Image: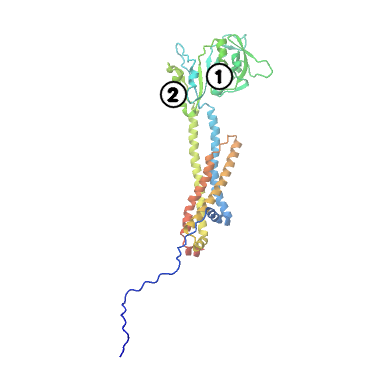
Amino acid sequence: MTGPPNRAPRLVGPADPAPAAVGPTHPAPRPVRLAATDLLALGSTGLRTRPLRAALSALGIAIGIATMIVVTGIPASSQAALLTELTALGTNSLQAMAAPDRDPPTKLPESAVRMVGRIGPVTAVSAVGNTHTVVRRNDRIDPSNGSGLTVLASHLDLLPTISARVRTGSWLNPATASFPTVVLGSVAAARLGIVDLPAGQPSPQVLIADRPFTVIGILARTPLSPDIDRSVLIGWATARSELRFDGHPTVIYLRCAEPQLEAVRGVLAETIFPERPGQVVVSRPSDALAAKRATEGSFSVLFLALAGVALLVGGIGVANTMVVSVLERRAEIGLRRALGATRGQIRGQFLSESVVLAALGGLAGTTLGLLVTVGYATWQGWPLVVPVESAVVGVAGAVAIGVLAGVYPCVRAARLPPTQALAAG
């Protein structure tokens, strides 16, 4: 009797591994990286779809940036006008003279003017010398009556050094300074009865040491050097040849770089008279210099404070606008996420929108601020000073504000889950 064929028993064990998949493998898709132009176009979509809100938001930051330009430009122009007036009061000028009441009288060296001109920060130097003679209107006046006026030998570069100007006639030049000609200070002209020099008429004459000198010019009032107003000025060479002037300067006038004024004053006496610096008296800096420096500091603090407030207001406005935009566009955010947009792309969209909005406001505000500044300064007659850094900071600051103001809204938009965003829409 035959039975079933013998079969090897099957051992129960772990399941066989699944057969390997047959066919090509496909890597996981990588998110598309948006180009800068695409990102800019995407970021401006919200601005184009809501033009009124975008305009109002840009207007807010434009007013802030314009305020920054105006509060720096207008005070800077006003400050420039004020500093010009203070500079006219001699903030960069000094005077040096021999110490009075010395027996025998101190005489400054003839080389003093040349030596002072060698000091680095000195930009201009000139001098006058007392001739110790009397001036009269004519020979009928008592020879001892000099009307309280002083006859001074003068260097030809005196006027620009002391900020003086000729009211009528002309100043001494290399030709006229070699002849018996004089220029009168404003007070001297009034006391001598010479108030004008009409063109086409003979020039009046005065007597100095009983010698006639022709008047060729009359100076305007000189606030920085009132002694010049009471003086009769003649050329240095003529004073030597006609009046026996010894050539020693009496008063030395100089201008120097304003920041170096104190340093120049410290070495001036030793430079003028190295052997006897104690016998040289140097004027102290003008009180207008301290006022000028205080004015500069006050305006600088004011500029910084006002500009900071303006930028803060503009930044808050942009941030508020972007937060509201995220809340209103949650459905759009959810739809884009559902279609495959990454969180980084959502962040880039809203951040670029914030930057574009702030940049447009910055450009508009900078333009508006510059126009207001130019118009107001022109109306007031001030020198136009528009700080270039303010215009640059206006646009750059607006972009920076856009970045800072858009950080929180763009992060919030990127964190919205697609389902929640679609449900909220």
Q: Would you name the residue on which mark 2 appears? A: 266
Can you give x and y, in whole percent of width and height, for residue 276 in the image? 43, 16
Give, as a three-letter code, the residue at label 1: Ile
Q: Which SS class for mark 2?
A: helix
The residues bearing labels 2 and 1 have C-alpha atoms spaced at a distance of 26 Å
Residue 421 falls left or right of residue 183: left
Residue 271 falls left or right of residue 190: left
Give, as a three-letter code, the residue at label 2: Gly
Can you give x and y, in whole percent of width and height, for residue 52 in the image? 58, 54
Q: Residue furthest right?
A: 200
Can you give x and y, in whole percent of width and height, for residue 76 in the image? 54, 37
At a point 58% along the width and 40% down the height, the residue shown is 373
Can you give x and y, in whole percent of width and height, for residue 369 in the image? 57, 43
Among the 4 quarters of the image, the one containing residue 15: bottom left
Residue 388, label in figure:
none
Q: How many marks?
A: 2
Q: Which SS class for mark 1?
A: helix
Q: Would you name the residue on which mark 1 appears? A: 228
Above or below — where is 402 with respect to 113?
below
Q: Residue furthest bottom?
A: 1
Above or below — where is 282 with respect to 317?
above
